[in-house]
Amino acid sequence: MRISIIGLGYVGQNLAVCAASAGHEVIGIDLNYELISDLAKGKSFVPGIEEQILLKLISEQKFHPTISSEAITGSDIVVIAVPTPVDNLRKPDLSAVIKASKIINKHISDPTLIISESTSYPGTLRNVIKPIVEENKGNIFQFAVAPERVDPGNSKWNIGNTTRVISGLDDLATRRAVEFYSGFCSSIYEASSPEVAEAAKLLENTFRQVNIALVNEVSEIVSKIGISGTEVVKAAATKPFGFMKFYPSIGVGGHCIPVDPEYLSYFAHQQQVDSKLVDLANELNQGRVEQVISRIKKYLGKDLNGLRIQVAGIAYKTGVSDIRESPAIKLLDALENNHATVSWHDPLVQKIEDSSSSNLSTEIDLGIIVTPHPEIDFTVWLNNRTRVLDLSVTEQEFGWPKFL
Ligand SMILES: NC(=O)c1ccc[n+]([C@@H]2O[C@H](COP(=O)([O-])OP(=O)(O)OC[C@H]3O[C@@H](n4cnc5c(N)ncnc54)[C@H](O)[C@@H]3O)[C@@H](O)[C@H]2O)c1
């Protein structure tokens, strides 16, 4: 089949490689010219998308990355994989989904299956995407959702072995979507409606947000008697049933965990239902960096004014270069607002706006570990007996006890 994917970020690129490897002809559209030109050369910023595979698929004419939206003409299936962030008021920003739907409306005139992989609140497929795509076209399309669950950098779980939840607006749409995903997913779950699938995706990430807020709170409580929340979680996690471990941290980051619960909260308020727990977890995690800063000040017994502090790892999690919503960036800002002299080291990020990664330094008063990519070697801090606070969420020890 001829498959078009609108949006070639983390989600779109993974899908493109899977669908093209499964034998489809894949047209990938993105409005970012630099990204398309890199992809054409086999270069990708997405962990796990390898140069030789990209070049092979491109040379075999199975994958065509392009900025031209007209290229979707004649597709059997069009997949929407564009971002669904929040706006300045932390309300859903569906502008990219709306734009993608308009592109489909403009360039597709034959019966086509439209699938949305973008995360959004229940009813987005039915009430936002469908009316735009169908405007002046009549009832020639089928619609389905198949929310993506990819976890970039996860070596165990990928598109192939993670169950895909799918649901169409009618039986034909569901059947066609299931047939497409069965070509590269080993397990499919058919939800009874697109709204169930959309809500399930929001629940998955809200579950994480709420549990992370909970362990952060426990960490604050037990710190008052000088014990580590991480150690408490480790002990609790020995229970083989009824408990799932989440570790204390400086907050949540990335495009999903801090954002998707806001979509659930927005939807709840649209339905005139309270979402107190979701809202509280959002609020707690948003304010988490300030809480950690005051804990650091208490621990040091002084203000941060004039202290030379270096942060190791600023991506939102290990193994990726993604800094979207990264709490480490908020930490850098908060340290600066407290008049510390701040530097950072992240071999995967290298540059943010006007500041760049610097080598791990010994000329500092305090080192802070946030995102310990495997590429970071802490020997220099260990050898120099640098004062270090390990705020990372991994189980791995780096030579200092977990601070949170
Ligand atoms: N990143 C993840 O781990 C992940 C996991 C599951 C679900 N999701 C969801 O999948 C969706 C996509 O996320 P992502 O991480 O791939 O985003 P991303 O920002 O990495 O990629 C989206 C791409 O879409 C492009 N784009 C935006 N508007 C466009 C338009 N009108 N036409 C063409 N291209 C356009 C952007 O240039 C960008 O390259 C979001 O709804 C997200 O919540 C993401």
Image: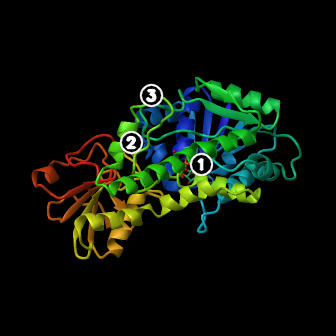
Ligand 1 closer than 8 Å to the CB at disc 3? Answer: no
Amino acid type at mark 2: Val
Can you name the residue that lies furthest to the front here? Answer: 225
> What is the distance, in whole Å, between disc 2 and disc 1 at their CAs?
38 Å
Above or below 132: residue 143: above
Tag 1 secondary structure: loop
Residue bearing the label numbered 3: 240
At x 77%, y 45%, the residue is 108
Decide if residue 260 is on the left or right side of residue 145: left
Q: Earlier in the sequence, mark 1 or mark 3?
A: 1
Does residue 76 appear in this view?
Answer: no
Residue bearing the label numbered 2: 233
Decide if residue 239 is on the left or right side of residue 267: left
Residue bearing the label numbered 1: 7
Q: Nearer the viewer, residue 158 or 18?
A: 158
Residue 94 x/y as whole percent:
67, 57
Amino acid type at mark 1: Gly
Q: Earlier in the sequence, mark 2 or mark 3?
A: 2
Ligand 1 closer than 8 Å to the CB at disc 2? Answer: no
Look at the image and tell me in which quarter the N terminus lies.
top right
Above or below 267: residue 148: above
> What is the distance, in whole Å, between disc 1 and disc 3 at their CAs?
41 Å
* Residue 345 figure quarter: bottom left
Ligand 1 closer than 8 Å to the CB at disc 1? Answer: yes
Classify 10 Å Cα crowding around label 1: few (below 14), some (14-19), many (20 and above).
many
Q: Nearer the viewer, residue 245 or 105?
A: 245
